[in-house]
Image (tube, coloured by chain):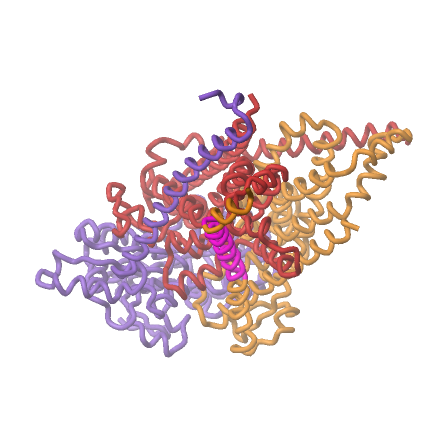
Chain colours: A orange, B purple, C red
Amino acid sequence: MAQPLERQQAKPHLAEEWVGKVYTLLCIAFLILTIFSLVYFVASKGLSTFFVNGVNVIDLLTGLKWAPEGEPRLFGALPFIFGSFSTSLLAAAIAAPLGFCASVFMVEIAPKFGRQYLQPVIELLAGIPSVVYGFVGLSVIVPFFRDVFPGQGVGIAAGSVVLSIMILPTITTIATDALAALPKGLKEGSYALGATRWQTIYRIVLPTTLPALMTGIVLGIARAFGEALAVQMVIGNAPHIPRSLFESASTLTSAITLSMGNTAMGTVANNALWSLALILMLMTFVFVFIVRWLERRSKI
Amino acid sequence: MPAFYNMNCQEKNKELEGELYEMKKTVMMLMVLALTVVLAACGQNNNNGGASSAPASSAPASESAASESPAAELSGSLLATGSSALLPLVEQASKKFMDIHKGVSIQVQAGGSGTGLTQVSEGQSDIGNSDVFAEEKLDAAKAAELVDHQVAVVGMAAVVNPNVSVDSLTKQQLVDIFTGKVTNWKDLGGEDQKIQIINRPSSSGTRATFETYALGQKSEDLQGSIQEDSSGTVRKLVGETPGAIGYLALSYLDESIKVLKYDGVEATVENVANGTYPVWAYEHMYTKGEPSELAKAFLDFMLTDEIQNNDVVELGYIPANKMEIKRDVNGTITK
Amino acid sequence: MSAKTANKIATSVIVAVSGLIVLVLAGLLGYILVRGLGHLSFDFLTSAPETIRRGGGIGPQLFNSVFLLFLTMIITIPLGLGAGIYMSEYAPANKVTNGIRLIVEVLSSVPSIIVGLFGLLVLVNLFGFGFSLFAGALALTVFNLPLMVRITEQGLRSVPREQKEASLALGLSKWKTITSVMLPISMPVILTGTILAAGRVFGEAAALLFTAGMSSPRLDFTDWNPFSPFSPLNPFRPAETLAVHIWKINSEGLAPDAKEIAAGASAVLVITVLAFNFSARWLGRYLYRKFTAIK
């Protein structure tokens, strides 16, 4: 009974399968093509600063003075690298404990209430566009810092605060998933031994989910590292390493946004900005690799 | 037909498949239709020499048929990109021009003087709007290909936070501030207040103008200075930060900030026109080589009294024909 | 300190922090809406922006945002679905697949400003599309695609294995199983994810600054011919979206009411994103109930 039916339906089946395979393969090919061309074009533009214009790589990475239009032309990008790292790390330092508290609340303390109210709140925070964050930062946070703390109001502190709110949803979502995936037996065993809830969280849950939490934190850092518009409005943009948290500073993204439109393509000033973009892209790769390494560790 | 829950397994499957199949068909058809429209639009646009690709070649083609009455029957499209300082003026003028010539479409975009010069030099736009001479941004060879049309003059003034008590600064005092030699207003006759510099980025044309004509030298990016690329943000920060100093085009001045005199000369249109106030720059609209007929018509339109005496003044610029002196790229002044 | 006291303190800290987060969001939303809602009106939502005069609106920008979203989704959904189907159904479990997964992860982490720069270099300059809706849509596709792939994969994986096996056992080809059985079942998950992704795309600005441009030509809304340069449907015209407009008004606003316009536009943007979020959740729940016949 199966044999003749199969042969009857073989032709349209094969055509369908063929359609399916080709279509999905084409989509994947497009995806692969996209990422490779992205990397190729950004890299070729970024590397031209070194190969065509003769700027020294080490000078770019470690130099302290950035003056591509000055005399002499200087291309020290260290202030930007420093700014990017400090704002991202500080933002993660602020957002990680906040996110952890929120996820513990949602999973352990008040699951029903948490899912109904806190979860949408977190999703909404993720949905607010970055221009709005920058705008609110400039109108609210910068004047507040200027009045309360000694300094200019702008700077790494303002940038980190804005970024921390922006990456909070990322960290919280991943932490919540990690906490919810814990086998119940682990917690129940702890409770059965007479531990309080906080003791369970502190001694059992936290260490076990640490790799997953770290993944969330690293992803948050990566997002903060790549954020451009919101940071550029509140960071001050002086191409120097600041001497305090409330002094004008710069990040890789803010430097690019600030000057890209003012420079002509092909000139060394423009190429230098592409080199900054290349550094940004390479750091993204590093973050992805770190996340993968962490994920592998948590799988044991 | 029995109710769904009364059917047996095979019938249910068939029923579901049928329904889903119908739904899928409609969705697929809609998507294919939409895709076709988009693709057709692409194809047609490429054939018509779309808005942005090869506009220079399409504009003369559509005008050669209408060259009898040059003023009346212009058609085609123009793309002007570049300086955001020049954008309001060109946009407003383009709207008036399009009202007169219904078949013309002019698109004006910002992107910065650098972008504008690059795009007109590479042929991606018809007109490049720039706050600076092309020679200052492009290589000499590329700049030599461009033809300059100076449509307006923009004056610039140093501005301070309203609670700063100083009214006028000399050239040397400005230089001292922007090179970091003087850091407190009390050294200049004001109160004991730290000077907060709000600068433009080093690649900005506005800054280049300010440095060349107000300071006479390049200024450094000092530690602790704030840089913003947009005039609006500069104005906001100067207005809010105690002790702040920055510089803005005259069109951005308002009550939230205080305007300083330069060497005792007030920043007014008359003073710029007669040459006593030196901090100003031409607004350029560059074309690659001589402009096409449509571009020429538009550029001529920019220089008519209608635009010069109305929009230019309204937007805070100074009409090019009101200037009593001329200045070239090297700064040499002629009457 | 006894364990009980520590527990109490810890619990109150956690609850306080969670309350703080809710307060922050409430404050943020309140700030934007209070400042902006007062300025909203039908006139504001439909008229063109004024450069230096009062009374400008956001009509063309709102239309551009919606139209750009539509264009992006037309391109992204088929591509994302296809790639997601490949990753979850056709891809063999080998090193190449791992490599592709790595590529998807990398693409999803690339900062949006780099996507915008890439768009500037390749789409605007190299291919000569200029600042246009088309360039913007393609740039946003690059930005949105990894998300779509992940959503599709998630959705397909949520289909119970028995459904898939039953369909295959009945003799349907693999492709037919995917399209007729698995996709409809995973539709709630995919649809919810797509709407959330659409919300993200709607608010995106960094990738569009250099691709769709910062200006919008004079649009004739009665001209529906997509080939005409005045038509709002022409995908090759520059198209400033709402998010980019907010950026521009805040930076270079010359009009005397620039602050109010920026506030109003921000309010509109936030309300739209909220609407996307809520409708995604509601739609997901509704479809799930319908498709699984829960009365």
- Residue C139 placed where, x, y %? 46, 55
How many numbered discs, if any? Answer: 0
Residue at 50% x, 43% y: name it.
Answer: C179
Residue at 41% x, 58% y: name it.
Answer: B111
- Residue A101 placed where, x, y %? 73, 36
Q: Is residue A20 magenta?
A: yes
- Residue B186 placed where, x, y %? 58, 54
Residue at 48% x, 60% y: name it.
Answer: C117
Over which residues does the magenta segment extend?
A12-35
Magenta segment main secondary structure:
helix
Q: Quadrant of the N terminus of chain B?
A: top left
The one nearer the camera, C172 or C91, is C172
Rendered position, C158 above or below B207: above
Q: Quick check: B318 left or right of C148?
A: left
The one nearer the camera, C67 or A93, is C67
Rendered position, A122 above or below A8: above
Extreme residue toward the left, this view: B68
Q: In this view of the protein, can residue A31 be seen by the observer?
A: yes
Q: Quick check: A141 left or right of A267?
A: right
- Residue B179 placed where, x, y %? 55, 65
Q: In this view of the protein, can residue B243 be seen by the observer?
A: no
The one nearer the camera, C104 or C22, is C104
Q: Is residue B81 magenta?
A: no
Q: Quadrant of the C terminus of chain B?
A: bottom left
Rendered position, B295 above or below B332: above
